[in-house]
Each structure stands twice: as structure tokens, then as C-alpha cells.
């Protein structure tokens, strides 16, 4: 899986999401949107880890596709948090950039996997 780049980046992203969740709860007193972000943002890495030990190529593709859906959902929650002024532009741009990198990597893996299954 690309020298574990996706594995490493998804783990670092999950750590950032946990810290952002803590900040939003403690400093902004925001509990609903941040919980959604916590779930989707940490699921990405979990699905990447599951894909590492997939039972088949089809199982691998399925798990990576779920990771893609989760990072896309995390992007949605980040955008909503910025639009509702829970995140300022600087906070948003930093973590949004990481999420965009992840979705590009995951999408690239999916495209490669699709071509190898045909």
C-alpha cells in the first residue's frame, strides 16, 4: 500500500481529528458536529488498517472504498464547522489540506485496484 503512506497519513489525520474534537468540545462547547467529525475522521485510518489484511482483492477494494467515503464525510463536517464559524480559516485550511491529500491518495489506490481486478 504505497510504502504505508496512506496508513501513516490516515493515522496522523486521526490524531489531528481527535485533538480537534477535544478543542471543539472544551473551547467551543460544540458537541454534535464534532462527534460526527470524530467518527468519520478516525474511521478512515481504521478502514485502511483493515484493508491491509483483506481476505481478497475484492475485500481490499471494498474497505478502501469505505475509507474514501469516510474521508469525504469528514471533509463535509470540516466545511460545515468552518461555515458555522467553529473553525477559523487558518484552522480549516490546515486540516482540510490533509483531508484533501488523503482523499486523492485513496482515490488513486481505488483506481489502481479497479484496473487490476479487470
Image (cartoon, rainbow, N blue to C red):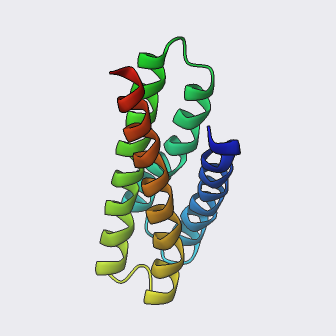
Q: Is residue 111 above or below residue 83?
A: above
Choose between 27 and 54: the one closer to the eye: 54
Q: Position of residue 28 (x, y in %)?
A: 49, 77
Q: Is residue 94 above or below residue 22?
A: below
Q: Position of residue 3 (x, y in %)?
A: 70, 43
State which quarter of the image contains the C terminus.
top left
* Quadrant in which residue 9 is drawn: bottom right
Q: Residue at x 36, y 84 (%)?
A: 85
* Quadrant in which residue 63 is drawn: top left
Figure label count: 0
Q: Residue at x 53, y 66 (%)?
A: 98
Left or right, 9 with respect to 56, comes to right
Choose between 64 and 18: the one closer to the eye: 64
Q: Residue at x 36, y 30 (%)?
A: 114
Choose between 34 and 16: the one closer to the eye: 16
Q: Position of residue 102 (x, y in %)?
A: 50, 56
Q: Is residue 3 above or below residue 105?
A: above
Amino acid at each position: 500500500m504505497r510504502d504505508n503512506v496512506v496508513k501513516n497519513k490516515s493515522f496522523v489525520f486521526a490524531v489531528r481529528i481527535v485533538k480537534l474534537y477535544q478543542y471543539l468540545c472544551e473551547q467551543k462547547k460544540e458537541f454534535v458536529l464534532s462527534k460526527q467529525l470524530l467518527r468519520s475522521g478516525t474511521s478512515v485510518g481504521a478502514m485502511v488498517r483493515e484493508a491491509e489484511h483483506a481476505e481478497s482483492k475484492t475485500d481490499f477494494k471494498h474497505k478502501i472504498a469505505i475509507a474514501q467515503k469516510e474521508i469525504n464525510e469528514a471533509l463535509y463536517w470540516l466545511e460545515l464547522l468552518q461555515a458555522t464559524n467553529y473553525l477559523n480559516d487558518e484552522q480549516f485550511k490546515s486540516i482540510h489540506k490533509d483531508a484533501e491529500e488523503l482523499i486523492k491518495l485513496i482515490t488513486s489506490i481505488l483506481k489502481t485496484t479497479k484496473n487490476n481486478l479487470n
